[in-house]
């Protein structure tokens, strides 16, 4: 921000800029928007952040974000506890739940293995996953990490850990999206589409 801008506004914009997907221009717009709020609206906004931060915690079973000790999915007796879908972040669960097709449970890693970024296996929620499998009853673990270098590396690492435990480990199929056009698909997407082809 320009030197003529008040320091508290600059500091507020810098905090917004720390959020994922928010560049400095967007951060400045958000900061100016906050300044246009009434005192009551600004207080409600601040209270909502503090309340969420202090009351939401990780589910003791799947590590999803929840208000209670156990999230609603893990607490649902109709869910198939023998199938665990492993995802990177809590927001990935929302994507699966929107399909209304998956009836198993989840496990949130809260990150992916990335040695270049200093994220080693002990810095994601792996030991909690291993403990769940060690308790018995798990038949299949679906690796649903994104098809990035880190996502693939994490899926392979976890797969190697789980194979000796007698658990079936599967990976989401990746390829062409519905409505996609071949000419715009990149080489990796086309390769995955070929690799994961099904008989019709």
Image: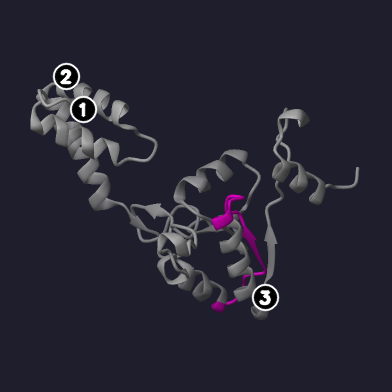
Q: Quadrant of the N terminus?
A: top left
Which one is nearer the viewer's eye here, 14 or 172? Answer: 14
Q: Position of residue 118 (x, y in %)?
A: 40, 64
Mark 2 in CB contact with mark 1 (< 8 angstroms): no
**Of helix, strand and loop, which one carries label 2?**
helix
Q: Quadrant of the C terminus?
A: top right
Q: Residue furthest right?
A: 200
Instruction: Report the Cα–Cα distance between label 3 and label 2.
Output: 56 Å
- Does residue 144 belong to the magenta stretch? yes
Looking at the rendering, the stretch of residues picked out in magenta corresponds to: 134-150
Residue at x 46%, y 51% (from the top left corner): 89
Say if 25 sits above or below 70 in the image: above
Which one is nearer the viewer's eye here, 2 or 37? Answer: 2
Which one is nearer the viewer's eye here, 115 or 132? Answer: 115
Say if 5 sits above or below 196 in the image: above
Residue 166 in the figure: left or right of residue 35:
right
Residue 98 in the figure: left or right of residue 127:
right
Q: Quadrant of residue 37?
A: top left
Q: Which mark is residue 163?
A: 3
Q: Position of residue 146 (x, y in %)?
A: 58, 50
Residue 25 in the figure: left or right of residue 152:
left
Q: Quadrant of residue 35?
A: top left
Residue position marked by numbered label 2 in the rendering: 36
Q: Which mark is residue 31?
A: 1
**Of helix, strand and loop, which one carries label 1?**
helix
């Amino acid at each position: 921000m320009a030197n003529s801008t008040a320091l508290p506004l600059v500091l507020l914009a810098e905090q917004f800029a720390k959020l994922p997907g928010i560049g400095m221009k967007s951060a400045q717009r958000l900061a100016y928007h906050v300044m246009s709020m009434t005192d009551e609206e600004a207080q409600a906004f601040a209270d909502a952040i503090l309340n969420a931060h202090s009351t939401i915690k990780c589910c003791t079973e799947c590590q999803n974000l929840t208000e209670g000790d156990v999230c609603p999915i893990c607490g649902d007796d109709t869910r198939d506890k023998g199938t665990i879908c492993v995802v990177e972040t809590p927001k990935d669960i929302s994507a699966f739940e929107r399909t209304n097709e998956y009836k198993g449970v989840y496990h949130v890693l809260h990150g992916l293995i990335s040695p270049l970024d200093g994220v080693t296996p002990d810095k994601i929620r792996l030991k909690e996953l291993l403990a769940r499998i060690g308790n018995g009853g798990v038949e299949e673990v679906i690796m649903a990490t994104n098809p990035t270098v880190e996502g693939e590396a994490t899926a392979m690492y976890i797969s190697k850990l789980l194979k000796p435990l007698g658990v079936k480990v599967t990976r989401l199929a990746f390829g062409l999206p519905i409505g996609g056009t071949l000419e715009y698909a990149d080489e990796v997407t086309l390769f995955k589409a070929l690799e994961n082809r099904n008989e019709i």
